[in-house]
Image (tube, rainbow, N blue to C red):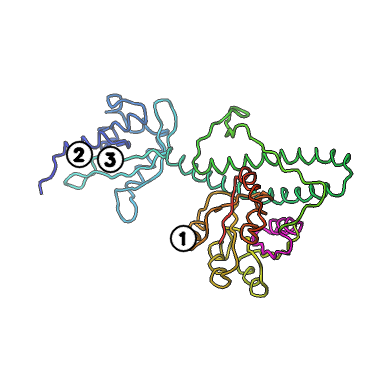
Amino acid sequence: MDQLPPVYFERLLESSLDIVIAVDRKGQITFYNDGASQTLGYAPTEMKGKHVTAVYPTSDEARRVMAAMRKGEAGEQGKIKNFETTLVNKTGEQIPVAISGSLIYDEAEQEIGSIGFLKDLREIRRRDQLATLGEVAVGVAHRINNPLEVIVNNLDILHKHLARICPEEAYEVEEERIESIQRELERIREIVNGIDEMAHGRRYNTTEYLGGSRMADFGKTETHPWPKPEAKPISRALAGLAILVVDDDLGICYSLRDLLREEGCEVEIAVNGLAALDVLARRTVDIVLSDVMMPDLDGYDLYMEVRERYCQTPVVLMTAYFYDKDHVIKRSHLEGLEMEAVLFKKPVDPDKLKSIILQRCRPELLDPEAEPAIKAREGPVFAKS
């Protein structure tokens, strides 16, 4: 096979987006490509013939790179790969780069120069930083949602309790206080949802913060009115149901337990999938409400075990956000999990929770005229078997 003439390779190097710089044995620049010009701001005519230290912040840094190249790495003397250093552009800005280069020798094995390929690390580091921030955002949203759910559930219980025990005049005062808390909780929920969506690629704006720094702008949050409890106890359609709540956050277990007991349910709790199977081995329940992400058996594993051992027991999978990193919901769906309501975003909407359980356990008691109102308020949803 015929070899390409050297001019082909020279043209390829000239048009590379990476920085390519070659120097002679005295350290003077003999080749300086378009990528170097775009990144550093100097035209090739400005740099050819100059000493290579002109592109480094200090002479010591230039000598450090050359010493590393002469020493070599992994047994290859005269070569370096992805060696991190710093260049400086025409405006004085320092630019982190990774250099892969080699010394050039003549036929007598004498060093006559070197060539380096340098990659600008700023964009790479920015992408890594954004990926890390995305992971942090997802984690923060999840961690906030769990205690938020406990607060929302207990506030709902308190609201109903006050409606039953307070005289009408006193209740009006307490109701205003509770509604103000509910409004602020709704704002927090919208902000958490915004963080979650931002972490998964939604475009967002920024606004100026203190000291000229910027912060994410989630816009104006829209609040939705919470349902007012009736002053007299209402018919509890869930009364008598045995429900198993599974979540590795004990606070979530307790808040859901209290919420469901208010509806007359008998509630068992388990803080992981294995503990849930122990509960199911000793007693029968009408439905299992399980978190998606758990340390031993995740929601998919638990769903598969329940389907195998207790095929008549419906399972509802709950998640704190729409992100399903391990595809728990998707894998469960492929194994038969129905998807009319596939995700339920915490904090739990008590009316939606009640509707979901009724659909699975007592569909004949579900008021078809109430469904549109419930669906209008659902942001998050559930999954069931």
Q: Nearer the viewer, residue 201 or 111?
A: 201
159 or 120: nearer the eye? 159
10 Å crowding of disc 1: few (<14), some (14-19), many (20+): few
Query: Distance from label 1 to label 3 (Cα)?
Result: 55 Å
**Can you tell which of label 1 and label 2 is closer to the viewer?**
1
Pointer 2 and pointer 3: residues touching (CB < 8 Å)?
A: no
Residue 173 placement (x, y as % from top left): 85, 38
Tell me: 96 left or right of 317: left
Above-or-below relation of 304 to 228: below
Tell me the crowding category of disc 3: few under 14, some 14 to 19, or many 20 or more residues within 10 angstroms, Cα based.
Answer: many
Q: Residue at x 33, y 48 (%)?
A: 80
For label 2, the residue is: 9
Q: Is residue 329 left or right of residue 209?
A: left
- Looking at the rendered image, the disc whose residue lies closer to the viewer, 1 or 3, is 1
Q: Residue furthest bottom?
A: 282
Of marks 2 and 3, the one in the foreground: 2
Which secondary structure, mark 3?
A: strand
Mark 2 or 3, nearer chain start: 2
Q: Earlier in the sequence, mark 1 or mark 2?
A: 2
Residue type at the position of mark 3: Ile
Residue 115 shows which numbered tag? 3
Q: Quadrant of residue 197?
A: top right
Q: Earlier in the sequence, mark 1 or mark 3?
A: 3
Q: Residues under labels 2 and 3: Cα distance? A: 13 Å
